[in-house]
Amino acid sequence: MDTLESKPTGRMKLAMNPLAEQLNEKIKAGNANVYEVLSTLGREIYFPKEGILSQSAEASTHAKKFNATIGIATENGGPMHLSVFQDTLSGYKPQDLYPYAPPAGKPELRSVWRTKMLQENPGLEGKSFGNPVVTNALTHGLSIVADLFVGPDDAVIYPDKNWENYELTFGVRRHGRIVNFPLFTESMTFNSAGLREALLAQKDKGKAVVILNFPNNPTGYTPGSVEGQEIIDVLYEAAEAGINLVVVTDDAYFGLFFEDSIQESLFSKLANLHPRILPVKIDGATKEEYVWGFRVGFITYAHENQEILSALEQKTLGIIRATISSGAHPSQTFVLQALKSPDFAAQKQEKFGIMKRRANKVKELLDSGKYGDVWTYYPFNSGYFMCLKLNTIAAEALRQHLIHQYGVGTIALGEHDLRVAFSCIAEENLEELFDLIYQGVQDLQQL
C-alpha cells in the first residue's frame, strides 16, 4: 500500500460561502456520516444561485421583449449557426444542438436514463435515489467523486486488477491513499476476504472510499450472486464497525453479462442499505451504447434523505460549473433520441449478441488445448476484455514482440498479465489473433 504525500497548495484560506454552509447543514441534519465523508473541497463547493446562470434562467422565463443575458448568439428567433454544421445535422432542431446544455444535463435525458436504470435494475424499485446528473463520460464522474470525497491520506480501496486511471484520479489528483487487495482468491472467485481486510484496516481512520468495477476492466469478470452478496455483507460489516463508506459502482460496461453472473449493478443492493454507506453509481452511454466519442455519462447518489440527495446534487453541479461548466449539448441530444427510439432495444440486443459470440469464441479457443501450458487465463464472463496470465514470459516483452514482429497490439499489465480486447476483433479473426500471441510466446521461449 502506497501513501501519496500531500503537497502544500500555498493558497490563502477563504471564508466558506454561505451557500456551501447551507448545503453542509442540510447534510449534517439528514445524516452526519455523509458530511464526515466529504473532502475539504466537498465541504467548500456549492452551486451559485445568484450569478449568470440563475439570472439567465430568470430572464428566459420573464424577459419576453429582449433577453440580453446569456453568452450565445441568436438569429431569426433561434441560436445562430453555420450551415456547414446544420447541413450534416438536419435531422435535429438547432435549439437541441447549439445552446449550452444545463449544468446537470438535459432534463429529459436525465429522466429517461433514470427510467432505464429502474428497468435494468429492478432491485432499485422502492429505493430512494437521486436523479442522474450528466457528466462528460465516466472518467468525469469518477473525478467528481474524487473531488467531493477524497482528501490527503483518505483510503481509496479497489482490487489489484484495475483501470490505471483510478490512480491518477484518486491518488495523484486528490492525494488519496491507494489500498489494493487481490481481485481473485486461489479458487478464482472474488476475494471478499481481501476486501474485508482492507476495509477493517481503516477502522481507526473511520472513512474509506471503495471502487467496485463490474464487468471488471481488465479481466472482464463479474461476480456471481453468492459473491455479490458476500461483497454487500462485507461492506455492511465495515459500516457496522463504525467506518463511513463511499461505495462507487463503476458500471462502465454494464449490461454486457454473457454468462451466469449478477445481472444488476450492486448499486441496487447498496441503496439505503446502511446509514454509514453512501452509494454512488457511475455509468453512461459511452460503452453501454457504443458511443465512446459522445462522452455522455451519469453520476447518481442513493440516500433515504431527500435533502441530502438535493445537497449532493448541488455540490456536484458546483464541481461541474467550476470545471467544464456543462456537458456537450449535441451528444446529449443524440443519446436522448436514441434511447427514445422504438428500434433502440432491438439494435442494442443485436450488438450484445455479437459481443457474446466473441467472448464465447475466445473461451472456446483457450479451452481447446491447442496452446499448451504457456498461459492460463483469469475468469471472464462479461464486458470487453479478458486477461492471459503468462507462465514463462514477461508480459511487456511479449507485447513489444507482438507489435513489432506481427503487428498485433495488446496491453501488458504487471509482470505476467496480458489484456486482450476481444471487443474490437471480429469473431472470425479471433483464432488467428490467439495463434499469433501463442507464436510470440514460442519465439521468446526460444531466445
Image: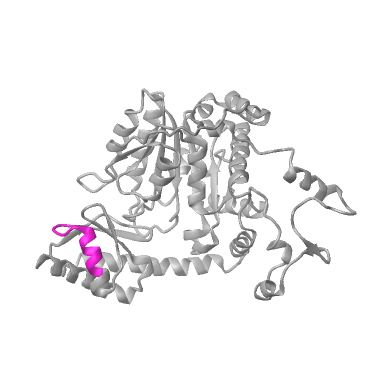
In magenta, the rendered stretch is 390-402
Residue at left offset 49%, top offset 62%: 292
395 over 186 or under it: above or below: below
The prevailing secondary structure element of the residues shown in magenta is helix
The quarter of the image holding the N terminus is top left
114 over 94 or under it: above or below: above
Residue at left offset 63%, top offset 55%: 109
Task: Tell me where residue 299 appears, x and y as whole percent.
Answer: 54, 46
58 over 430 or under it: above or below: above
Q: Residue furthest left?
A: 446
143 or 364: nearer the viewer: 143
Q: Quadrant of residue 436?
A: bottom left
Task: Tell me where residue 431 appears, x and y as whole percent.
Answer: 26, 73
| Residue 396 counted in the magenta span | yes
Task: Give the colour scheme of this rendering.
Answer: one colour
Residue at left offset 54%, top offset 24%: 32
Residue at left offset 86%, top offset 47%: 62
Task: Tell me where residue 391 appears, x and y as whole percent.
Answer: 15, 57
Q: Is residue 241 left or right of residue 44?
A: left
230 or 144: nearer the viewer: 144
Q: In this view, does 30 lie to the left or right of 446?
A: right
Q: Which residue lies furthest to the front in this view?
A: 10
233 over 344 or under it: above or below: above
